[in-house]
Amino acid sequence: MSKEYRFNPGDFVVYPTHGVGKVVDITQSEVGGQKLELIAVNFDKERMTMRIPMTSVGKTNLRPLSSRDIMESALECLKGKPKIKKTMWSRRSQEYDAKINSGDPCQIAEVVRDLNKPADKGEQSYSERQVFEHAFGRLVHEYAACCGIGIEEATTKIQNILKGDVPSSESSSL
């Protein structure tokens, strides 16, 4: 059961498997004798533009940026204690990928929280680091777009939350 959204050129959107993109155009096109309304979404980070038929938008789970309340919940999740299962890495990796590709900022924040390793806590394997960076990048990009700030500032704020270096007045407001 998906919600129907109306998108306009210039809107930031989230495509669960690609992250934050920007609607660049909505056009009419004829494909196979059928007229289709296509939404073009540009993903700068991946250097890709995707064209999605408007009739398929609900099936792809394309959505607008998260609300400030949802981002606030995601940031709160980062402050929690990591929950690492004692299962094999390959299984956990699949679960983390599913959370990242869900497009849900709170699930992505769980992955970031669980895989965040402070420098004094030992090293991560290469694949753990890759999954962490993927989740971290997704969270940073949506947070930056939601707050209207730059990627560097969003990165710093999220890193500070992970380190526990956030004054209480700053953590309670996006």
Image: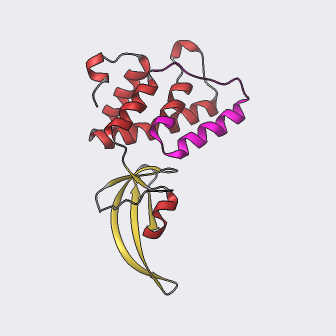
Residue 4: name its quadrant: bottom left
Residue that extends furthest to the bottom in the rendered view of this protein:
33
* For residue 73, above or below residue 161: below
* For residue 172, above or below residue 127: above
* For residue 98, above or below residue 82: below
Tell me residue 166's x, y (percent): 33, 18
Residue 147: name its quadrant: top left
* For residue 99, above or below residue 112: below
In the picture, measured across the screen, residue 1 lies left or right of residue 6, that is right
Tell me residue 120's x, y (percent): 53, 12
Asked whether 75 or 112 is in front, the reply is: 75
Marker count (numbered) = 0
Tell me residue 88's x, y (percent): 73, 29
In the picture, measured across the screen, residue 118 lies left or right of residue 172, that is right
Examine the structure image and report whether residue 107 is included in the region drawn in magenta.
yes
Coloration of the structure image:
secondary structure
Examine the structure image and report whether residue 45 is included in the region drawn in magenta.
no
Residue in the image at 60% along x and 41% along y:
97
Residue in the image at 60% along x and 20% along y:
123
Main SS of the magenta segment?
helix
Residue in the image at 40% along x and 16% along y:
164
Residue that extends furthest to the right in the rendered view of this protein:
88
Tell me residue 63's x, y (percent): 41, 53
Location of the C terminus by quadrant is top left
Q: Which residues are magenta?
A: 80-108
Asked whether 48 or 32 is in front, the reply is: 32
